[in-house]
Amino acid sequence: MQPLITYLVEDNKTILTNLMETLSEIAHLEIAAHSATQSEASQWLTQHHANWHLAIVDLFLRQGTGLGILAACRDREPHQKIVILTNYATPEIRLRSAALGADAVFDKSTELDGLMDYCIEQASNVRPEPVQEAQREAGLCKRLLS
């Protein structure tokens, strides 16, 4: 099974630590990196464009917002998902997040189980990278022809 490469954006150290432990343990995610600001997150996600599957983003950050990160990552690949995790999951925030390309919005206080379920589902859908898959298929064809 391929790991679900995940990037976390959270400015509260306690929440960040708890998320990292819980997501790694329950959902079997590989946390690649994390940051606490919009600029750090946007820079990492765009510079490592092909190297992540999921970004979990807090809405209000030390500098900037999760909405700014969504806007910066609008051109991501279809398999790359971004979810907003916030204490302010109002209908307006959900609509605005969806309009900017969020794949889901979860409330920190009432929807953590939903976030875990989402992460587990995404982890089960991770496919090998196209190059690895092509190499595997080429090897299979070669064995079948010999």
Image (cartoon, grey):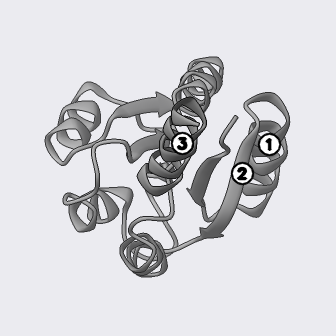
The quadrant holding residue 2 is top right
Q: Name which residue type carries label 2.
A: Glu
Mark 2: give few (<14), some (14-19) or many (20+) Cα within 10 Å: many
Q: Nearer the viewer, mark 1 or mark 3?
A: 3
Percent position of residue 124, x then y: 60, 25
Please give the residue where the numbered disc 3 appears in the rendered image.
Answer: 142
Give the mark, 2 or 1, whose residue is nearer the N terminus: 1
Secondary structure, mark 2, is strand
Q: Residue at x 59, y 30 (%)?
A: 119
Quote the CA–CA distance across marks 2 and 1: 6 Å
Q: Nearer the viewer, mark 3 or mark 2?
A: 3
Percent position of residue 23, x then y: 74, 39
The quadrant holding residue 34 is bottom right
Q: Residue at x 65, y 18 (%)?
A: 113
Q: Name which residue type carries label 1.
A: Ser
Q: Name which residue type carries label 3.
A: Lys
Q: Residue at x 79, y 42 (%)?
A: 24
Q: Residue at x 49, y 74 (%)?
A: 37
Disc sitting over residue 143 in the figure: none
- Relative vertical location of residue 16 with respect to residue 98 in this rendering, above or below: below
Percent position of residue 87, x then y: 51, 38
Please give the residue where the numbered disc 1 appears in the rendered image.
Answer: 24
Quote the CA–CA distance across marks 3 and 2: 33 Å
Circles 2 and 1: CB atoms closer than 8 Å: yes
Circles 1 and 3: CB atoms closer than 8 Å: no
Residue 56 is at least partly visible in this image: no
Quote the CA–CA distance across marks 1 and 3: 37 Å
Residue 110 is at least partly visible in this image: yes
Left-right relation of 42 to 35: left
Left-right relation of 138 to 77: right
Please give the residue where the numbered disc 2 appears in the rendered image.
Answer: 30
